[in-house]
Image (cartoon, rainbow, N blue to C red):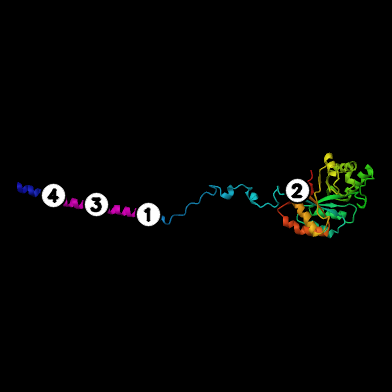
Amino acid sequence: MAGGRRGAKGPSTPRLALWGLAMLLLGAALGWGLSTVSCARKAEPARKERPEPAPRKPKRSRPSYEEAAPKEAPVKRAAPLEPPSDTPSVALVIDDLGYAPPELVRRLCALKIPFSAAVLPYLEFSRESATLVHEAGKEVLLHLPMEGGPDADPGPDALRLSQDEATVRALVRKALLEVPYRRGVNNHMGSRFTMDPKRMDWVLDELRRQKLFFLDSRTTKDTVAWERAQRMGVRSAQRQVFLDDDKSEAELRRQWDRALALARQEGQAIVIGHIYPETVEVLERWIPEVRGQVRFVKVSELVR
């Protein structure tokens, strides 16, 4: 019986060996599979070095900076073409057009600033000068002749103290018709006439009816013209500086500098010059020197 038991154990040994071999092979297979998976996972970053192109973003997913900026932004960034409004103002008025030949008037009108020009009536170049000034974009005034000192000749059909009301009014209307495009009036001479309140009232009433302003040239310190205009509600102003009573360059420069200083001190200055070649020549040189320091305006902008 003992031999039979040993015989029964004999066959189990090979089976155990086979079972162990199978388990070993299974373990090896599992190990190889896990190793393959692990290697595959480690290889994934290498594929990410060459990614597919990213999909395009929606065209209007978010507005760009330029789209978000206000439409008026470019205008705000633009450099101003004119000096700021708080820059001192200078109104330049050039008197006595009508005598000067058109060539000098064209040269005056070539100045690259706004200004006003006062044209005398009844002269050879009166109408042509007014037209040249207007077409250049400048402002036309009637330079109305009035009686001055005893030795002064204001020209034909001037207003005189000896004339009655009807005559004064008729002469004002006549002179206005002689100068086209006029927007206002200033006096030519008139040191005696502008001292007379009654006669100035007749003149100013005619201007009021035609909605014209008056610039008192102040040919005398005793003028009442501006005061009467203010009382009657006629828009008006007063000359502050005469530029060229003396046509030497040194004196012209002195008066020019005085006008600029007055503008800086008071905020504005009204300057009267004349259609002299000397005056035009210095203005051609001096106006560019003060560009940006003062604002040149037509005198109508300073009447009140």
Label whose residue precedes the other's in the sequence (2 or 3): 3
Q: Amino acid at mark 3?
A: Gly
Label whose residue precedes the other's in the sequence (2 or 4): 4
Q: Is residue 150 magenta?
A: no
The residue labelled by disc 1 is 44
Q: Residues within 10 Å of mark 1 (few under 14, many from 20)?
A: few
User: Which quarter of the figure is the C terminus placed in?
Assistant: top right
Query: Which mark, residue 12?
Result: 4
Q: Residues within 10 Å of mark 3 (few under 14, many from 20)?
A: few
- What residue is drawn where x is 77% and y is 59%? 284
Q: Nearer the viewer, mark 1 or mark 4?
A: 1
Q: Amino acid at mark 4?
A: Ser
Real-space Cα separation, disc 2 to disc 1, in angstroms: 81 Å
Q: Secondary structure at mark 3?
A: helix
Q: Amino acid at mark 2?
A: Gln
Q: Secondary structure at mark 2?
A: strand
The residue labelled by disc 2 is 268
- What residue is drawn where x is 81% and y is 45%? 237
Please name whichever residue, 19 or 290, is drawn nearer the observer in this view of the structure: 290
Q: Which residues are magenta?
A: 13-42
Label whose residue precedes the other's in the sequence (2 or 1): 1
Q: Position of residue 114 (x, y in %)?
A: 77, 52
Real-space Cα separation, disc 2 to disc 3, in angstroms: 106 Å
Real-space Cα separation, disc 2 to disc 4, in angstroms: 128 Å
Q: Nearer the viewer, mark 2 or mark 1?
A: 2
